[in-house]
């Protein structure tokens, strides 16, 4: 397996079909991601279209894990919290393609979240620097 690259998804990179297929596969395998099986392709596509539009508005960050040209996992960081909770974000829809499970991709995706939690552009934050200094990242 070539190295996995993790990068933000924008919706302009032609990923919608791959995202829909990933969501459908996750739901079919019993994944608890707020949808029920069977999930219609149109419903999955509509979800990702709405999600990527929210990402374009800065309300969330959607990260994808790539093995070459194949999207093999994704995680979403929900950033649109109430005004009294600017320090919060929520992790949602952490999914790995079935044939890539057990390879550490979900761990890699979750490990990218600290950079995006406080700065959606992915810059280093004091929290991340602290964890790296003590020798581990939560």
Image (cartoon, rainbow, N blue to C red):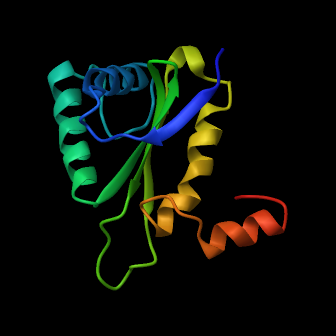
* Image location (x, y in percent) of residue 104: 67, 32
Q: Is residue 102 above or below residue 32?
A: above
> Which image quarter is the N terminus in?
top right
Please state if 61 lies on the left or on the right of 98 as rendered.
left
Residue displayed at 76% across by 63% down: 132
> Which image quarter is the C terminus in?
bottom right
Residue displayed at 62% across by 49% down: 111
Which of 112 and 80 lies nearest the eye of the viewer? 112
* Image location (x, y in percent) of residue 75: 45, 43
* Image location (x, y in percent) of residue 65: 51, 32
Residue displayed at 28% across by 60% down: 58
* Image location (x, y in percent) of residue 110: 58, 47
Q: Residue 83 falls in which quadrant of the image?
A: bottom left
Which of 90 and 64 lies nearest the eye of the viewer? 64
Q: Is residue 88 above or below residue 37?
A: below
Q: Is residue 75 above or below residue 40?
A: below
């Amino acid at each position: 397996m070539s190295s996995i690259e993790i990068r933000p998804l924008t919706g302009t990179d032609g990923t919608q079909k791959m995202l829909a297929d990933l969501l459908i596969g996750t739901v079919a395998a019993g994944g608890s991601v707020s949808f029920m099986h069977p999930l219609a392709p149109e419903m999955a596509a509509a979800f990702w279209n709405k999600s990527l539009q929210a990402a374009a508005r800065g309300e969330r960050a959607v990260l994808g894990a790539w093995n070459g040209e194949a999207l093999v996992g994704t995680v979403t960081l929900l950033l649109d919290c109430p005004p009294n909770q600017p320090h919060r974000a929520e992790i949602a829809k952490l999914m790995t393609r079935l044939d890539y499970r057990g390879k550490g991709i979900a761990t890699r995706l979750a490990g990218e979240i600290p950079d995006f939690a406080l700065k959606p552009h992915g810059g280093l934050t004091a929290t991340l620097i602290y964890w790296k200094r003590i020798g581990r990242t939560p």
